[in-house]
Structures are given as C-alpha cells and as structure tokens.
Amino acid sequence: MIDGVRVTPKRVIPDERGRLAEIFRSDEADFERFGQVYLTTAYPGVVKAWHYHKKQTDNFFCVVGMMKVVLYDAREGSPTHGEVNEFFMGQHNPIRLRIPKGVYHGFKCVSETEAMVINVPTEVYTPKEPDEYRMPAHDPSIPYDWARKDG
C-alpha cells in the first residue's frame, strides 16, 4: 500500500426504510481537517485522471455505482515511490479511501451506470489558485493501463 493511503471499510445499515452509511467522522484516527464536501461523477467507461495536490488530502466514498480508483506514488523520498495501487469502491465495496497529498490519482467508472463519488478534502477549492497538478490519463510516465483486464 502506498505510504499514507488508508482504506476504511464502512458498514451499510439497511432496514425496511432504506440504508444508512457513515462516510467520515471527525473522531476517526485519520481525520485531519475539514475543507469542503463535493460530488464528482463519471459515466460508464470514462477515465478521469491524473492529478495530485500539494496541500490537500482527499477522502473518497463512492455512493452510486462502482469506481476503479488508481493511485501512483511519484513523491521523491517516499518509501513507496513508484508504487501503483488499485481500488474498487462503491455499492459492492463500501470503503472510504484516504489519498494523501502528493499522490497522483484518477478513476474510471466500471459500473453499467454513472458512478458518483463524494470527496471530503482537507482544503477548500480556490479557483484562482487551484491545488491541482494534472497529467493526461494515458501519460506513459505513469505505469498504468486503464484498459479492462479480462481473463
């Protein structure tokens, strides 16, 4: 696992009225601070990648569909420099994924319908000075192929 990444399994509590899932609590061990909450989506088969943050830690939870989230550690001096992690999250695997600053990340919708991810980052988004550093989804400097792996 990439240094600083945390996977927190989340319990979904169903009853005859519906479901409840706690996504993130301020008393959890890896809570840093609250910046904002936002929703991002992807249509089936769409890849949104790559970017990282210099200040912000992300906390992803997929509330609809299934998302393949991929991380790449390009941080110089990191004990896991060069490592790639792949996570499948969503209705079939309710986890919260903590993505530390400096780690490239992206996702691909792997469900048959639009997938929706809630992010609880540690910082607010500032349009005039965005804390986002991007690379194309298929940049060869990141050793990852977004194609489906059959077999």
Image: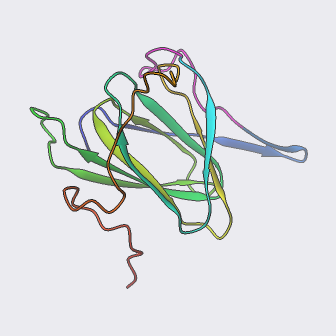
**Residue at image x 45%, y 32%?**
58
Left or right of 55, for residue 67: right
| Colouring scheme applied when the structure was drawn | rainbow
Residue 26 painted magenta: yes
Of residues 130 and 54, the one nearer the viewer is 130
Counting labels gives: 0
Which residue lies most toward the bottom here? 151
Could you tell whether 96 is left or right of 57 in the image? Answer: right
Q: Position of residue 38 (x, y in %)?
A: 62, 33
Residue at left offset 35%, top offset 31%: 53
Residues rendered magenta in the picture: 21-34
Q: In the rendering, at what x and y percent does residue 138 appear?
A: 32, 63
Q: Quarter of the image holding residue 115?
A: bottom right
Q: Position of residue 45 (x, y in %)?
A: 54, 69
Query: Which residue, as the protein is rendered here, is positioned at the far front?
Result: 128
Magenta segment's dominant SS is loop
Furthest toward the right, the residue is 17
Q: Is residue 115 above or below residue 73?
A: below
Residue 97 appears at what percent x and percent y?
45, 40
Q: Is residue 111 above or below residue 124?
A: below
